Amino acid sequence: MQRGVRRVAVTISVTIAGMTVATGLTGCGLLHDTPRIDAAAKFLPSDTTAIVFTDRQAVAQRLGVDVSGRDATDEQVVSYNKALADQGWGTTQLATYLTVMKDAPFNELDIRWEAAARWGSGADARSAYVWRVSDKLDLGGLDRSLTEDGWKKDTVDGLARYTIDFAKAADPNTGLVAGMYPAAMTDVLIDSDDHLVVGSGDPAALADIAAVANGDATSLAKQRGAFAPLLDKAEKAEFAAMSTGSGICQQVTAYGTDKPTKPGPLYDALGHPTARALVATGDPMATTSYLEFGSADEAAADATARQALIAQGKELRSEQPFRHLGTFTVTHDGSLEAIASSWATGPRAAVSTEITGGGPAACLPS
């Protein structure tokens, strides 16, 4: 099916932000055996610099709490929230609002996977949440709800786009519009062919996603750049946080302080990767950090320095010796380095430290 040919006149194309985790996109879409993160990359701009991918449905199924949309009972919602909180990842940007959105036309339980992405740089930097939603979700119902509750509807690249002045429309006490819609849905794009809902705070970001979806702009799936080896490693990911560019090494603040830590010479010896990722997979649960370097020699040198750091040094946020925190194994293949982690406190620690810049894959700014 040609991406430019769409049912533009149909008014059943709207949705709110959500996450997706499925066996692949349908519609004009992707084969069922397409890795889910590759399915997400099909809708992200080629100049994407950061992705946080969450396969919500896969996590929920593994934990035995997968329920759908408005069919979930209050008890099931409580069980779902507890299981995902204990897991430490697997929820989307809409998770906090599940209770108030349970009977809404769209909520977290309708999401298969979520890709939170940032692209561009400087004043041109943009971001959005791309949600692959259930094939059964009534996008027409979402469309009606959004327009009735104050969103202005137009089209961009043949897709329905909804915008609202969120600051004026939201209840100052709850921060929600119509008692259920959060700020992640300030601007919404609906792609009914591919069962996508996209949320952002920037209508221009939605136009970027629409152009990629219609083939008018190059997708990250077609021009993977520095993300290529990381996307390959994340094919079975339940969770993956990856970034590229000059800002991927950062100063880290220790617990209980507001000042950057003083890492010392073991950290000074580390290299500077061009791209990084943390990948979490389930059954059995495993977390691995990946660092991509400019050459095999750079990766080998960093691997040697990182092994010394793990053996002798302290983790930046906790300021505890790595040897007290778990088992961390460093290997490299060509320019790609891998740090497999087994945290004493469980795999959620790997996610937490990656998001905040600590852990065995930490590196310092140039």
Image (cartoon, rainbow, N blue to C red):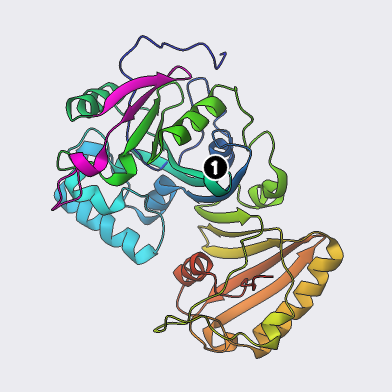
Q: Looking at the figure, which quarter contains the N terminus?
A: top right
Who's the residue at 46% across and 68% down the image? 352
Across and down, in percent, residue 25 comes to: 50, 30
**Which residue: 71% across, 58% down?**
274
Answer few, some or many: residues within 10 Å of disc 1's Cα (few below 14, many 20 plus, some between 14 and 19).
few
Instruction: From the viewer's perspective, tell me whether residue 18 is left or right of residue 299.
Output: left
Percent x, y of residue 77: 22, 51
Q: Which residue is mark 1?
A: 124
Looking at numbered disc 1 in the image, what kind of residue is underneath it? Asp
The correct choice, above or below, for 88 with respect to 25 in the image is below
Look at the picture and state if 153 lies above or below 4. below
Q: Residue at x 54, y 21 (%)?
A: 214
Residue 111 image position (x, y, % from top left): 37, 40
Q: Nearer the viewer, residue 25 or 156?
A: 156
Q: Is-magenta flag for residue 153?
A: yes
Specify the quadrant of the image occupied by residue 46.
top right
Q: Is residue 77 left or right of residue 3?
A: left
Residue placed at 17% from the left, 47% from the top?
Answer: 100
Q: Is residue 236 visible?
A: no
Q: Is residue 222 above or below residue 160?
A: below
Magenta stretch bounds: 151-176
**In the rendered image of this protein, does residue 27 appear above or below residue 339?**
above
- The image position of residue 207, as x and y in percent, is 47, 29
Q: The residue tagged with tag 1: helix, strand or loop?
A: helix
| Camera-side residue of 270 and 60 | 270
Q: Is residue 205 visible?
A: yes
Is-magenta flag for residue 224? no
Q: Is residue 30 left or right of residue 226?
A: left
